[in-house]
Image: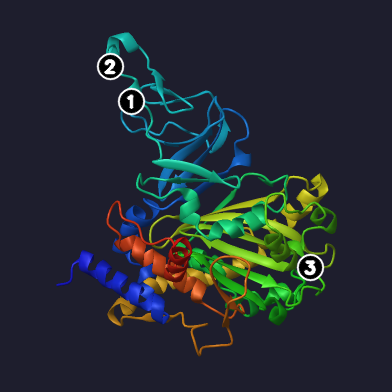
Amino acid sequence: MTSHTDSSAKLLDAVTEGAEKGVIPASIFGDPDLYRQELRNVFGRCWVFLAHESEIPAKGDYVLRKIGEDNFIVVRDDEGEINVLFDACRHRGVQVCRSDSGNTSHFRCPYHGWTYNTKGNLVGAPLWRNAFGGMSKENNGLASAAKVASYQGLVFGTLDQSAPPLKEYLGGMAWYLDLVFGLNEHGVEVLGPPQRFVIDANWKSGAENFSGDDYHLGTLHRSVWEIGAFPVPFHENMMGYHIQASPGHSLSFSMAQDANEPGPNYFGFPDELAQSFNTTNISADQLEVARRSRVFVGNVFPNFSMLALPMTEDGSNHPPVGILTLRTWQPHGPGQVEVWNWFAGYKNLTPEQKDRAYRAGLGTFSMGGAFEVDDTEPWITVSRNGASTAAELLDFQLNYEMGKPGVGISKPVKEWPGPGRVQWTRYEEGVQRNMYGFYAEMMRSAPGQWPSLVFPEDAAADKEHRA
């Protein structure tokens, strides 16, 4: 009789081999034992996106977020530092934060009244002298994430003390985050709290889609072109690059083939805003890539995705405008994911431009938006079939071969200003293979050990350079 552990190990063996070949077992989208291992080995170890700094600008500001399925308070303390605190009282483990966001000087447990400051320190409890006189307060504060770091205003946390620094974990993906979030010296801010909605799907479907699944655009999202929501014809939109920025992290650009080709440029943001885009925080190469870009879509492993592109919710009355959406795919079991969806914009957009971008985003990339409604149904069936007895007994494999040598028109690109493995065109699935290859390595890594965060050819080139 095959044990659950043996079954999970067999699945991971198949993912490891299949990520290179272009076949992935369907059961990874529905296996409950594999999911429990994901919570520990992926979400319990990787750097996970939690918030944008603009959500907690003042001392005492906080938001309640998740790492895996667990609640964490992301709070700015009295010294302006950002802390990520496990939302569990040290006395009996009761949740101490009862609001999704707010401003406070303390968090007080409703059960016995233990009270903590914004650093997580225990500062008091009712009848302290009688109940706990002589007990150390210092050893009874709220537990904190092992490490917390911010990059370009994006706040991440990890529960693994052995995790590499965030910048090292991001690897080549940092170059592309700079390109979007550092494009404007004024920076980016979120345009309101995140939307939250639940889909009966597996978190990996959203993550792999935003890694660069562009092939579905002409079928699933065909109506978006028919109503004029997006200004670039489908086949022209497929001209661009798929980039494995570093192990696990992938992205896709739709770009003008010629540097002098007419727009939209800079992801469709207004021309007057584009005049403020410069090389204060980024390189000239990054600025030029941004200038030629129509669409940027990417995923930081495991579950932080972003998308910048021109969109409109009403093509007959409003021309497309640049929108920037950030999202996380919060796991709620192997067959359910809660989508957290933020809209963001550059700080020096006018109030009218921010409102227009927000409305365009709501009509396209929200729980009632055209894109979201399209994507939901296929992802539900992926999860349902992944949990099926048939998929397990038939050893049902899914095809991820697009872009491999001899498959399709996509070809490797050598001359590219940024890091990573690059392919032209967007008819390509190496970005997903990159995600699953790293996924399998994280799932199999022993505590304290990490997979390589650079590709072998990059490591060899760096070693040669240092020599």
SS at badge 2: loop
Q: Is residue 189 at all visible to an observer of this figure?
A: yes
Q: How many marks?
A: 3
Q: Nearer the viewer, residue 70 or 255?
A: 255
x and y percentages locating residue 124 in the rendered image: 39, 17
Instruction: Identify which residue is drawn at 41% across, 26% down.
Output: 110
x and y percentages locating residue 133 in the rendered image: 29, 11
Mark 1 vs mark 3: which is more N-terminal?
Answer: 1
Q: Is residue 387 at all visible to an observer of this figure?
A: no
Q: Which residue is mark 2?
A: 135
Residue at the left extreme, as displayed: 1
Q: CA distance from mark 2 to mark 1?
A: 9 Å
Numbered label attached to residue 140 = 1
Instruction: From the viewer's perspective, tell me whether residue 7 is left or right of residue 290.
Output: left
Kind of residue at disc 1: Asn
Instruction: From the viewer's perspective, tell me whether residue 447 is left or right of residue 370.
Output: left
SS at badge 1: helix
Q: Nearer the viewer, residue 463 or 178?
A: 463
Instruction: Identify which residue is drawn at 85% across, 63% down.
Output: 317
Q: Are marks 2 and 3 in contact (CB under 8 Å)?
A: no
Kind of residue at disc 3: Pro
Residue at the top extreme, as displayed: 129
Above-or-below relation of 90 to 53: above
Kind of residue at disc 2: Met
Q: Are marks 2 and 1 in contact (CB under 8 Å)?
A: yes
Q: CA distance from mark 2 to mark 3?
A: 64 Å
On-image quarter of the N terminus:
bottom left
Tag nearer the camera, 2 or 3: 3
Q: Which residue is mark 3?
A: 264
x and y percentages locating residue 132 in the rendered image: 29, 15
Estimate how packed mark 1 is, as few (under 14), some (14 to 19) or many (20 or more) residues with alpha carbons within 10 Å. Answer: some
